[in-house]
Image (cartoon, rainbow, N blue to C red):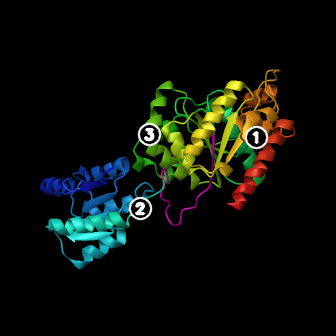
Amino acid sequence: MAEKILIIDDDVDTLRLVGLMLQRQGYQIVAASNGSQGLEKAFEERPDLILLDVMMPDMDGFEVTRRLRKNPATTAIPILMFTAKTQLDDKVAGFEVGADDYLTKPTHPNELQAHVKALLARKTPAKTGEIAVTENEKRGYIIGVVSARGGLGVSSVASNVAAGLHTRAQADVILAEMTPGQGTLGMDLGIVNTKSLSEILAGTVAEITPEKVQASLVTHSTGLKILPASDNPRDVDLASRVENFEVLVHRLASQARFVILDLGSGLPTFVQKLLLSCDHRVVVLEGMPNSINHTKILLGEMTELELDPKTISVILNNRQRSDVQIPWAQVQEKLGYPISVALTPAPEFFLQASRLQTPAIVAQPASMTSQQFMKFVDAVLEREKAQ
């Protein structure tokens, strides 16, 4: 695939000539005629290189560079500044705000091509789904919870693991429901405002600031910080905003020691990307033939994503007492993958928790199911320490 270059310049002739010149060299060109539009294009297109004019009326190149370097989605993109000015101070200022190279206009085509090739050659490609982290920004431990199909209790597992980590580690824990239009945490935990996730996904990447993300979190009575998803069916379309999901999770991970992601069911593109960002992945299934078969396929697809099997745990969530439930040892054999925890069927346990609008292990901490969750939580803590 051709490398993508974004040109930001208020001079139409420069946009046309430089763009044509680079297109002939086989590059894909994206153009913006001012600083604000350039930022939008950079966040949306994620180019391999940015050519940036310094002198622009609405926002000069220095300010554009500052904003690009502050955003995790664009902080590592090489920036080549060019301007009609030749003063040394302008060049120094450009390098200080984060520019990688500098050219004076008008520049010879061969000189421009040489600088472009050099910057692209130096660019270190990020791993798929990886978001650059600023040097001084902390990163919490991210756990993604997913299932092969809906109705297997992903949200219950995610909320109880989150509550267990908060109880055991006495640390900040964020529980984020990454299922726009299919949210259940709001109702389960008594949260009225469930629009924040949709608003974040509907906006631009540039708008996903640490402050906005922090303001979107709801502090539950248990101490958990929660980002619930809406239950408006129309919001399902927001699942296509993959870059927004990636930056959002990056922001969340900078604000808590643990981030638990309720990823719902299946492997849409955004879930694949987020699983790549996770430190630990949890797959939920039940002891029924169809669930086992679907989960086996899911685990196979996760292997295709080159996820380390050591970072994947399987939780057997037998939600109903039934003679048709397959014992965990047989589930493990049929699945061909170890079961980390087998939850004892306890429908009244979760029903009571729902009435109290709190995670089940908080409602009945001494129950057998709570102890099974805490055993898994202890294993997570050991893994986090080892990492």
Q: Is residue 137 magenta?
A: yes
Residues at marks 2 and 1, CA–CA distance in whole angstroms: 40 Å
**Kind of residue at disc 3:** Arg
Q: Quadrant of the C terminus?
A: bottom right
The part of the image, by quadrant, that contains residue 137 is: bottom right
Residue occupied by mark 1: 339
Q: Taking 264 as reference, is 66 above or below it?
A: below
> Foreground mark, 1 or 3?
1
How many other residues sit within 10 Å of disc 3, few (<14), some (14-19) or many (≥20)? some
**Residue 199 point in image, percent of width and height:** 46, 38
Q: Which mark is residue 294?
A: none
**Residue 85 point in image, percent of width and height:** 18, 71
Q: Which mark is residue 241?
A: 3
**Residue 222 point in image, percent of width and height:** 72, 43
Residue occupied by mark 2: 76
Residue span colored magenta: 128-145
Residues at marks 2 and 3, CA–CA distance in whole angstroms: 21 Å
